[in-house]
Amino acid sequence: MPKTKKESLFFTTIVCFSMVFSMSLYNLLLHDQLSWSHLVGGLIPGFLVAFLVDVFIVANTAKKVAFALPINREKQLHMIVAVSSCMVFGMVFFMSIYGVVIQTGFTEEFFSNYIGAFRQNLVMALPLQLLIVGPICRLILKKSRQRDWLSQETIN
């Protein structure tokens, strides 16, 4: 877990980019629209929206909810799973809205399209974050600490 503001920004950026890239591939495959132009064309705006939603809306709420859960806070794995799971639910909630608006706009089918997108995205995003992206990004953070790339005072 990040210990400084610089580490937190770095970690948020690599997790957010990795998830947006992976979920973009997943959604393009689901809709038979996989191409470099679709991937690259949607990646930057998707990343910017996801990053802003993460930093300004989801992160603090997800942490508050995770810390309120009846888990053993002394076990780092319990905290990681709780915070990551809450983050995924929040991000899938908002990014599914973004995806439906970009894909079909606000139509009469918006709500049903959103529910379908939310389900499909949650099924992919939760294991992706808990089993692949999260562990890889924590390893990258650990390696960056060992190389002293992110040295700064600790967060209070």
Image (tube, rainbow, N blue to C red):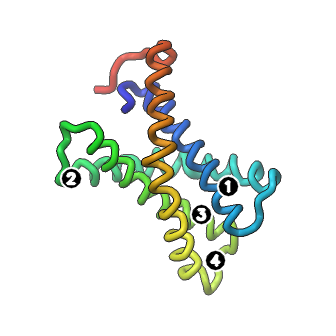
The CA span between labels 4 and 2 is 35 Å
Quadrant including the N terminus: top left
Q: Quadrant of residue 111?
A: bottom right
Q: Quadrant of residue 79?
A: top left
Q: Are marks 2 and 1 in contact (CB under 8 Å)?
A: no
Q: Which residue is mark 2?
A: 68
Amino acid type of the residue tagged 4 in the rendering: Phe
Labels 3, 2: front one: 2
Q: Which residue is mark 1?
A: 25
| Classed neighbour count for the residue bearing mark 3: other residues with Cα under 10 Å, few (<14), some (14–19), many (≥20) | some
Q: Quadrant of residue 35?
A: bottom right
Mark before the other along the chain sequence, 1 or 3: 1
The CA span between labels 4 and 1 is 23 Å
Q: Secondary structure at mark 1?
A: helix
Q: Are marks 3 and 2 in contact (CB under 8 Å)?
A: no
Labels 4, 1: front one: 1
The CA span between labels 4 and 3 is 11 Å
The CA span between labels 2 and 1 is 34 Å
The CA span between labels 1 and 3 is 15 Å
Q: Secondary structure at mark 4?
A: loop
Labels 2, 1: front one: 1
Quadrant including the C terminus: top left
Residue at x 64%, y 48% (from the top left corner):
21
Labels 1, 3: front one: 1
Amino acid type of the residue tagged 1 in the rendering: Leu
Amino acid type of the residue tagged 2 in the rendering: Ala
Q: Residue furthest front?
A: 131
Closest to the observer, 78 or 5? 78
Residue 71 image offset from top left, x and y in percent: 19, 49
Q: Which residue is mark 4?
A: 106
